[in-house]
Image (cartoon, rainbow, N blue to C red):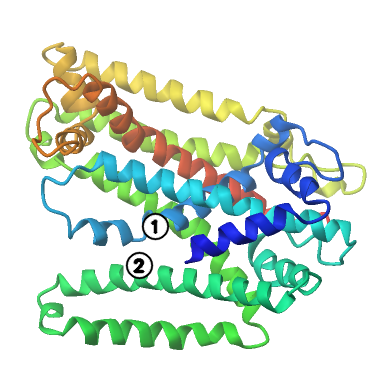
Amino acid sequence: MPIGFIFIMVLNGLCLPNSDEGIRMYLRGETNGVVPDPYKKLADGQMWADACGQIFFSLGVVMGIMTSYSSYNRRNKPIIRDVMAISFGNCGCSFFSGFAVFSIVGYLQWLDSPVASKTSSSSLAFVAFPAAAETMNGSNFWAGILGLTLFMLGIDSAFSMVEAISTVIYDTEWGMQIPRKLTALIVCSSGFLFSLLFCFSWGYTYFDVVDRYIAVYLMFILGMGECFGAAWMFGRDELAVGDDKIPVMIISITYWVANIFCGILTVFVLGRCPDIEKDPESFDPLELCLTDIPAYWGVIIFWLIIVCAMLASFLLMKKHDFGHWYRNVFLYGAYQLAMEVVKRSDEAMEIEGQWWAHPFILWWGFSIKYFVPWALWTLMMWNFRIDITPSKD
């Protein structure tokens, strides 16, 4: 029903006056007919952090939701097919919903509405859209559809979150003794009581703070923690007693030291150059020196250190076997998990004859082990720099 309502709102929005301006804002980022510099937009860490937090929340990543749902699958259930269907279905629905939202934004600009600038976060759903619905023919109908859609989407989200919590409780020894309905009742009642905090006059501010630090920092930290557990700690006990112990320690320690170094460097690199004439005491030679360094130098230095660690780990092995190093040092932990994912790409759980298997293992293992935690750490530090930098206002 929510998808049906969204489809109706898209059709209605595209028929409104000046909706094309809102669509151009959505697809091209235009503001008053001016297209922004794409390089400047792509260099905006705030944009990437918000987008990452949104897609994490939308897909239920690092929230335990997908883990709880997948626990009901049979052991040989194909994984890749489900992941592709869920990811593309979710992102496609979100992309389609954007037309309903931004066509309304263009319409509000045509009306010269004072809320036309409310184009982000909850202001769009609870301020801009209701204001536009009031001016349409059959305003009560459109306001009712909007409210019902948001209510149903909220119920859908509540289902998944309650399931994630209750599944973890039910998997414990003491939790199995509690009826599932009672567990769900306790979880829902607790959520209801905590949500009352948002109903007071200062609730919106509290909501903004919670949304900011849960959707950005906490999800980034959980994402890095899950990657660390899956790709760095899985299978570590077997490697810690074998001939691969020293190479693994070199590449793992170097990676995390370089990751932290890259994040800290990013904080300084993205700092503002102090205005010496207005505030001579603010002059900091170190900050001035680092401000002149391009931001991409942090990325270059990071990956150079990682490449050096990889070469050192290979050269320090007693037997220079590339295949052995690739499986048990470079992708240790992640390689075994990627193999299980590939095996569960069909019911037969066979890897032979699948031409895409080894490219997938390399891509998936490298992403989980090296790229994703580095990207999350850099985005978090980028976002941290924005939060600690005083606003111009």
Q: Looking at the picture, does residue 164 appear above or below residue 300?
A: below
- Residue drawn at the location 63% of the way across and 31% of the way down: 295
Farthest-out residue, top: 320
Q: Do labels 2 and 1 touch, CB within 8 Å? A: yes
Give whichever of 161, 385 is nearer the camera: 161
Left or right position of 213 against 391:
left
Q: Residue 60 carries which label?
A: 1
Dot 1 crowding, Cα within 10 Å, few <14, some 14–19, many 20+: some
Left or right position of 257 against 131:
left
Question: Residue 177 at what x, y percent from top left?
Answer: 10, 83
| Res. 85 image quadrant | top left
SS class, disc 2? helix
Left or right position of 289 against 332:
right
- Residue drawn at the location 63% of the way across and 40% of the way down: 268
Question: Residue 162 at what x, y percent from top left?
Answer: 33, 74
**Residue 391 in sight:** no
**Residue 297 in sight:** yes
Q: Name the residue under label 2.
A: 160
Sequence order check, earlier mark of 2 and 1: 1
Name the residue type under label 1: Gly
- Residue drawn at the location 53% of the way across and 44% of the way down: 379
Name the residue type under label 2: Ser
